Image (spheres, coloured by chain):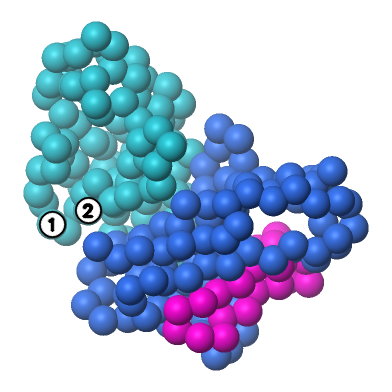
Amino acid sequence: GAVVSQHPSWVICKSGTSVKIECRSLDFQATTMFWYRQFPKQSLMLMATSNEGSKATYEQGVEKDKFLINHASLTLSTLTVTSAHPEDSSFYICSASPNRGFTGELFFGEGSRLTVL
Amino acid sequence: AQRVTQPEKLLSVFKGAPVELKCNYSYSGSPELFWYVQYSRQRLQLLLRHISRESIKGFTADLNKGETSFHLKKPFAQEEDSAMYYCALRGDNFNKFYFGSGTKLNVKP
């Protein structure tokens, strides 16, 4: 099956620094990738849709200047949490669907746990 | 606005008992409904989708448009079914997926 990989799996940073999380589709191309945020014991909240070669579209309430998304190629999307604060600590998950043979199924990365001190 | 509701955070049953995980949705268009599962220390993965009308690992789910529900059912639960289950809705624009809050299924021996 299709594989989505995230890096890093976990990261600890100081308040005020920026953190970049990568999401790669390893064996397929994806024009669109999705970034989710998961709070403890809560659902996945869709943050934004990452579009290859164009600007990401953000869900209501998500600060685009805070969560910078870049989708420079058909296999890589990055999420940068800028000037991170403790309230940004969370589990970030990316997902994607193959461009070819789209079946409606989302493939998920393993997630990246961010802890901001 | 779209919404997916899973009213139960935790569902505990004994092995061999029937199980039903509830999911209700709200969407103005024609959604596709999915169930995703997350086993312990694994990533989310697709369990089944309403358009395929298939049974996966003994689970079935029927889309009831009148009740806007997509409940997941299994007649005889197994211990290996213990996991987090998420109901998801895919809208008809931009392929966005929206998830419910999840139900943790605990199947006791």
Residue B63, position as x, y percentages in the image: 21, 47
Numbered circle sitting on residue B36: none
Subunit of mark 2?
A: B
Residue B86, position as x, y percentages in the image: 38, 42
Q: Residue at x 19, y 13 (%)?
A: B15
Q: Residue at x 24, y 26 (%)?
A: B80
Numbered circle sitting on residue B49: 2
Quickly name the residue at label 1.
B52
Q: Amino acid at mark 1?
A: Ser
Q: Amino acid at mark 2?
A: Arg
A91 relative to A8, above or below: above
Was residue A83 drawn as part of the magenta stretch in this picture?
A: no
Span highlighted in magenta in the image: A58-80
Residue B31, position as x, y percentages in the image: 32, 61
To the question of a shared chain for discs 1 and 2, the answer is yes
> What shade does chain A have?
blue
